[in-house]
Each structure stands twice: as C-alpha cells, then as structure tokens.
C-alpha cells in the first residue's frame, strides 16, 4: 500500500501555487483586452443579424409563400363558412362574419403569433428558473 503522507504532501505542494510578481499587471492587461472591442463586436453581430433577417425575408417573399398562405386562408375561410352555414347555432356567427366584423384572418394569425410568443417566453423563463 502506498504511503499516504507522501501523497498528501504532494497534493499540498501542487495546491499551493506561487504568486508571480507581475500577476496584477497581467490581470489588468487581460481585463483591458477583454473589455476592448465590445462595441465592434456588438455592431458586427447586429449587422450580421440584420443582413440575415433581410436575406431570409427576401427568400420568403421570393418563394411566393405569402401568396400561397393567402390562397389557403381564403379556401379555408370559404370552407368554414360553408360548414358553419349548415349548423343552426353557427348561422348567427356566420352572419356576423359576413357583415364585416373585424374578426378576419389577420386577427387569427396575430392571435396565433402572440400565443407562440407567450409559449416561447414561458419556456425561456422556465429554463432560467431551473
């Protein structure tokens, strides 16, 4: 069996590291290097994010996705109105929708977007709490 006093002495010697005479200067220069350039980094990250967002928006607009979504929305709206016209209770709701009430596809898309945002905020807060 190995000598435990030798191992303990070795651990103690490696645990005590000498302080170098220029440690303060080194730490100060290191901190200055870390603090320097954050403005440039923020501008670079923000600019690249903006460029990426513009490229993504251009791709979405160029692909015709919005026109396809509008077509699908119009078809589903017509289908829902036709289906709701057959239900006696829903006839009054269909009449309200046909009379130009502000409840249209944009309101439904906005509600879905806000619900997705709320879920995202809830998940991020739950992750932060853990």
Image (cartoon, rainbow, N blue to C red):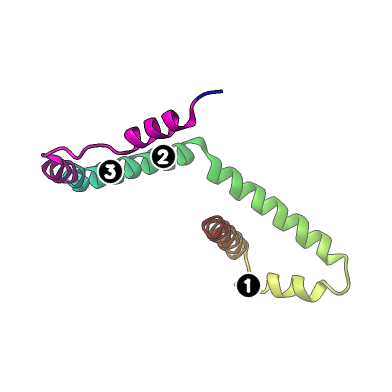
Observer-nearest of 7 and 72: 7
Task: Name the spot of residue 64 as percent of width and height, x first.
Answer: 52, 39
Q: CA distance from mark 3 to mark 1?
A: 43 Å
Q: Nearer the viewer, mark 1 or mark 2?
A: 2
Q: CA distance from mark 3 to mark 2?
A: 16 Å
Query: Callout 2: helix, strand or loop?
Result: helix
Residue 100, disc: 1
The residue that appears at 60% across and 64% down in the rendered structure is 111
Quarter of the image holding residue 14?
A: top left
The residue that appears at 50% across and 36% down in the rendered structure is 63
The residue that appears at 88% across and 65% down in the rendered structure is 86
Task: Name the spot of residue 96 as percent of width and height, x first.
Answer: 71, 75
The magenta-colored residue range is 3-31
Task: Determine which residue is flagged by label 2.
Answer: 58
Task: Name the spot of residue 88 as percent of width and height, x first.
Answer: 88, 73
Q: Earlier in the sequence, mark 1 or mark 2?
A: 2
Residue 66, disc: none
Where the C terminus falls, by quadrant?
bottom right
Q: Is residue 118 above or below residue 1?
A: below
Task: Name the spot of residue 90 as percent of width and height, x first.
Answer: 82, 71
Task: Determine which residue is flagged by label 3.
Answer: 47
Q: Earlier in the sequence, mark 3 or mark 1?
A: 3
């Amino acid at each position: 069996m190995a000598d435990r006093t030798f191992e303990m002495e070795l651990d103690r010697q490696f645990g005590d590291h000498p302080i170098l005479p220029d440690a303060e200067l080194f730490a100060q220069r290191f901190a200055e290097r870390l603090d320097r350039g954050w403005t440039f980094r923020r501008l670079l990250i923000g600019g690249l994010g903006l460029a990426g967002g513009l490229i993504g928006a251009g791709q979405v607009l160029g692909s015709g996705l919005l026109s396809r979504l509008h077509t699908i929305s119009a078809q589903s709206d017509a289908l829902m109105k036709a289906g709701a016209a057959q239900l006696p209770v829903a006839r009054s709701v269909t009449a309200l929708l046909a009379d130009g009430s502000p409840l249209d596809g944009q309101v439904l898309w906005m509600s879905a977007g806000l619900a997705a945002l709320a879920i995202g905020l809830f998940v991020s807060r739950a992750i932060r709490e853990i």
